[in-house]
């Protein structure tokens, strides 16, 4: 168990002992939180101190304002920024399902305008169906006619948060923080292609493996699968 925890702390340096306990049980260890916490401390393991954050751009869910009760009701969208090693901008469009917490997309490019937002929405709607609502801030990419036309054509409502009110988009704000903390702060991308590959790998791993306390330790993908399996229409 000690060796497993040491390996876990190397592979998941930002997750801490609570998520280690969840993942240990998923891996077959018959351990409770108390034992994992004791062994974690005995081994001198700890989450590294946060580095000074780079400036985040984008806002994040009035948790109380329209909380979804099933998947595909509200997609939250936001932009996030980083740079490649040569100092050039990386712009990310992050899209999450507020109910399952799944990261539906992290689209990475040098620049993303309203047409780029529509392209991502089209792709996701083709995979999941159009959502009932999309939640975003009042940035020029989101208030553009192209996005408004897409929403109207697909029967999707627009939920604009108030200026300077990041708490009204808290789920995607929280997601941005995790992406920043677990990947962007510790990785230097040499190219746009490298950034796309590594960030997509992180998104896939996040959906499949990252435990969420809101889902009682299930990952977003596990929670979505569980919800779907228990809400299938019953055959007549």
Image (cartoon, rainbow, N blue to C red):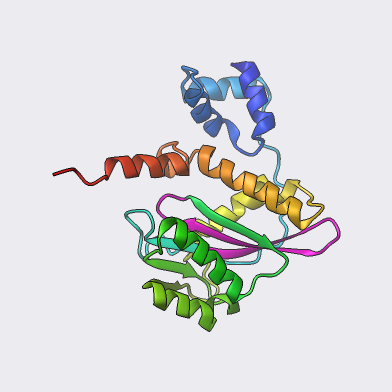
Where is residue 118, by image quadrant? Answer: bottom right
Residue 36, x across and y down, in percent = 54, 22
Residue 24 in view: yes
- The quarter of the picture where the N terminus appears is top right
Q: Is residue 36 above or below residue 103?
A: above
Is 87 colored magenta in this rendering?
yes
- The quarter of the picture where the C terminus appears is top left
Residue 60 in view: no
Q: Residue at x 63, y 27 (%)?
A: 8
Specify whether 130 is left or right of 200.
Answer: left
Specify whether 74 is left or right of 114.
Answer: left
**Which residue ends up furthest to the bottom in the rendered image?**
145
Q: Is residue 165 above or below residue 124?
A: below
Where is residue 38, by image quadrant? Answer: top right
Q: How many marks?
A: 0
Residue 173, x across and y down, in percent = 55, 59
Which residue is at the front of the view, 158 or 213? 158
Q: Residue at x 69, y 49 (%)?
A: 197
Which residue is at the front of the view, 142 or 150? 150
**Which residue ends up furthest to the right in the rendered image?**
86
Give the residues drawn in magenta, as a range: 77-101
Which residue is at the front of the view, 109 or 53? 109
Is 81 colored magenta in this rendering?
yes
Residue 49, x across and y down, in percent = 71, 42
Where is residue 72, by image quadrant? Answer: bottom left
Q: Residue at x 51, y 66 (%)?
A: 121
Specify the principal SS of the magenta part.
Answer: strand
Specify whether 230 is left or right of 206.
Answer: left
**Which residue ends up furthest to the left in the rendered image?**
236
Residue 42, x across and y down, in percent = 64, 19
Which residue is at the front of the view, 18 or 93? 93
């Amino acid at each position: 168990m000690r060796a497993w925890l040491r390996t876990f702390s190397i592979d998941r340096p930002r997750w801490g002992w609570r998520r280690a306990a969840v993942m240990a049980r998923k891996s077959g260890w018959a351990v409770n939180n108390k034992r994992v916490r004791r062994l974690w401390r005995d081994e001198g393991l700890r989450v590294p101190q946060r580095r000074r954050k780079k400036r985040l751009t984008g806002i994040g869910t009035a948790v109380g304002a329209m909380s979804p009760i099933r998947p595909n009701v509200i997609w939250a969208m936001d932009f996030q920024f980083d740079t490649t090693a040569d100092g050039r901008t990386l712009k990310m469009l992050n899209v999450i399902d507020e109910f399952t917490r799944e990261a539906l997309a992290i689209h990475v490019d040098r620049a993303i305008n309203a047409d780029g937002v529509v392209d991502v929405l089209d792709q996701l709607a083709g995979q999941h169906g159009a959502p009932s609502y999309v939640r975003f801030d009042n940035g020029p990419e989101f208030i553009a006619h192209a996005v408004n036309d897409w929403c109207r054509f697909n029967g999707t409502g627009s939920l604009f948060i108030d200026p300077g009110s990041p708490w009204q988009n808290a789920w995607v704000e929280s997601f941005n923080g995790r992406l920043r903390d677990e990947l962007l702060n510790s990785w230097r991308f040499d190219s746009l292609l490298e950034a796309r590959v590594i960030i997509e790998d992180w998104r896939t791993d996040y959906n499949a493996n990252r435990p969420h306390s809101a889902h009682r330790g299930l990952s977003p993908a596990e929670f979505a699968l569980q919800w779907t399996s228990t809400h299938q229409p019953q055959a007549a």
